[in-house]
Image: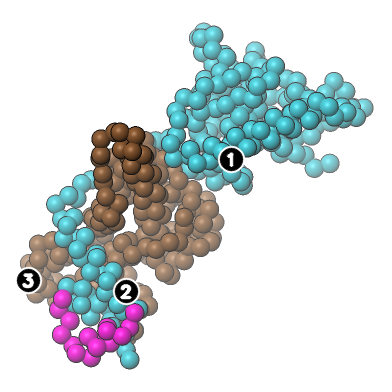
Chain colours: A cyan, B brown
Amino acid sequence: MKHLDDDEVVAAAVGGLDDDVARGHLQTCSDCEVRVAGSRRTVAALRRSGEESLPLEQPSAHVRAAVLEAVRPPLPGPVLDDAHTPLRAVPSEVSHRAPARRPRRLVAASVGFLVGVAATVAGVLVVGRDDPAPQAAPTAQRTATGVLRTLDQTSHRGAVSVVDGPGGRRLKVQMDDDDANASNFVQAWLLDPRTNEMVSLGVMEKRDESFAIPANLDLSVFDYVDISLEPYDGNPAHSSTSLARGRLTPTST
Amino acid sequence: MSTGIADDRTDETDGDRQVRDVGTRFHAGDELALAEAYDRWSALVFSIAARALDERHLADDVTQQVFIAAWKGRERFDVTVRPLPAWLVGITRHLVADEIGRQTRERRLQRKLGGRPLDRGTATTDDIVDAIVVSEGLAQLGQPRRNILELAFVTGLSHSQIAESLRLPVGTVKSHIRRGLHQLRLLVEVTDEAS
C-alpha cells in the first residue's frame, strides 16, 4: 500500500486525516506512524513555544577558537584548549606548578584518564633517568621544527627548532616580535596538549633564545611549544596568557 | 514523488541549498565548513543549552563539545537524512540531557545526605528541549515560511485564511507548511546518532 504523503502526515498530526484508505494504512505502517508521531510532537512543541521565542544568544568568544584549535592537530584524547584551560605543570626541577584556575565540571569524567596519562608520563620520566644517555651526535643536527602562531591561528609569531648536539638537545625559539615590556616578561614552555601539562624552559631575554631540553623529556609527548606573557608577580605558574603556540614536527632525515 | 518518504526538493529555497552545501563539505572533512557551521549555528546550540541548563559556562562547554563531537563523528553524518543544524541539535540534546541527568543525580545524592529536595523531573527534559528547539528552529526558517507556520500552529488560522492574509496561493501555503513542519520535525526526532 502507498505511504502517506507529507500533506497527509500533517493532516494526521493535527487530527484532520479524513481519507479512510490512508487511515487504514497508518494503522499498519510503522514508518508512517513514526512520521506522524514526530509531526504531532512538533506541532505540540510549536503551540507551546509560541510566546517564549527569545532572540538567540552567542556563546563566549573563546569557544570558537577552542573548537577550531581542537580539530586542527589530529590528536587523540582531550581537547587542546585555549588560554582558559587550566595548565598543569609536571613536577621537575625546571618546571613550576600551575594552579587549576577554572575547574570544568563537564570534563570531570576524563580526569581519571588524565591522571592515568600523568602517571604514565611520570613513569616515563622516572624510567628515562635510568636509561643510558643516547649517543651524542658528533655534529649538531636539527631533529624537529615548528611554526609559532597565535592561538586563533591567524597570525604568524615565530619559529622553533630542536637541535640535537654534543651538549644535548636544545630548543631554538625565534619570535617575530619582542613582547616583553615594563611589567611582563616572555617565557617558553613545552606542552603536552593531551593533558595540558607544561614544562618551563626559561625566559626569553630577547627575540632569539636557545634552551636546554631536559634529557628525559619525551618530545613525542611534549610536542607543542607555548610562549607565554608572564607578569612580574612572583608567581612561577603559567599566566594563562599564551602569546603563541606551535607543534614540533620531526624532520625527516 | 508519491511516497513522501524521500525528501521533496521541488520547493527547496536558496537557504536550504546553502545548508546542504555546508553539510556536504562538513561530512567531507573541510575545516572551513566547520568554521562556517560554527558561525551559523553556534548561537542555536548555545541558546538551547543555556535555556535548558540555565548556566552560561555550562552552555559554553556544551557548545564546544557539540561541535567537536560533530566533527569527530562527521563520517556518520548523512546530509540526505537530515540537514547539519538538525544533527547538531540532536547532539546538543544528548549532551544537555546528560548534564541534566548528572545534576539530577547530584540532587538526589544531596537529598540522601539530608539536603532539601529540588527536583526537575527528567521526564520533562524532552519537552523543555523540544519547545526550545522548535522555537529556535522556527526563528531560523526564512520568510514567508516562518510566518505561515506561526499563523497555522500558534495563531491557529486555516490554510485559506493564511493564504488570504498573506496574499499567497493556498497551494504555496500548504507547501510551506509541509516543508516547514518536515524541517522542524527533523529537529525533534533525532535519535542516538552521535554520542
Q: Residue A235's spot in the image, x, y percent?
A: 54, 12
Q: Residue B16's spot in the image, x, y percent?
A: 34, 64
Task: Please name the residue shown 47% across and 24% down the image.
Answer: A101
First along the sequence among labels 2 and 1? 2
**Residue type, numbered disc 1:** Phe
Task: Please name the residue shown 17% across and 81% down the image.
Answer: A17
Which residue is more in the foreground, A106 or B38? Answer: A106
Drawn side of residue A41 relative to residue A129, left or right: left
Q: Which residues are magenta?
A: A15-30
Q: Chain of mark 3?
A: B
Quarter of the image for the N terminus of chain A: give it. bottom left
Do callouts 2 and 3 point to residues on the same chain? no
Q: Is residue A17 magenta?
A: yes
Q: Secondary structure at mark 2?
A: helix
Q: Which residue is mark 3?
A: B161
Q: Residue B77's spot in the image, x, y percent?
A: 47, 62
Estimate the spatial distance between the alpha carbons at disc 2 and disc 1, rounded to whole Å.
Answer: 40 Å
Q: Which residue is mark 1?
A: A113
Q: Residues within 10 Å of mark 1 (few under 14, many from 20)?
A: some
Q: Residue B123's spot in the image, x, y percent?
A: 28, 55
Which residue is more in the foreground, B97 or A59? Answer: B97
Quarter of the image for the C terminus of chain A: give it. top right
Q: Which residue is mark 2?
A: A34
Estimate the spatial distance between the alpha carbons at disc 1 and disc 3, rounded to whole Å.
Answer: 60 Å
Q: Secondary structure at mark 1?
A: helix
Estimate the spatial distance between the alpha carbons at disc 2 and disc 3, rounded to whole Å.
Answer: 29 Å
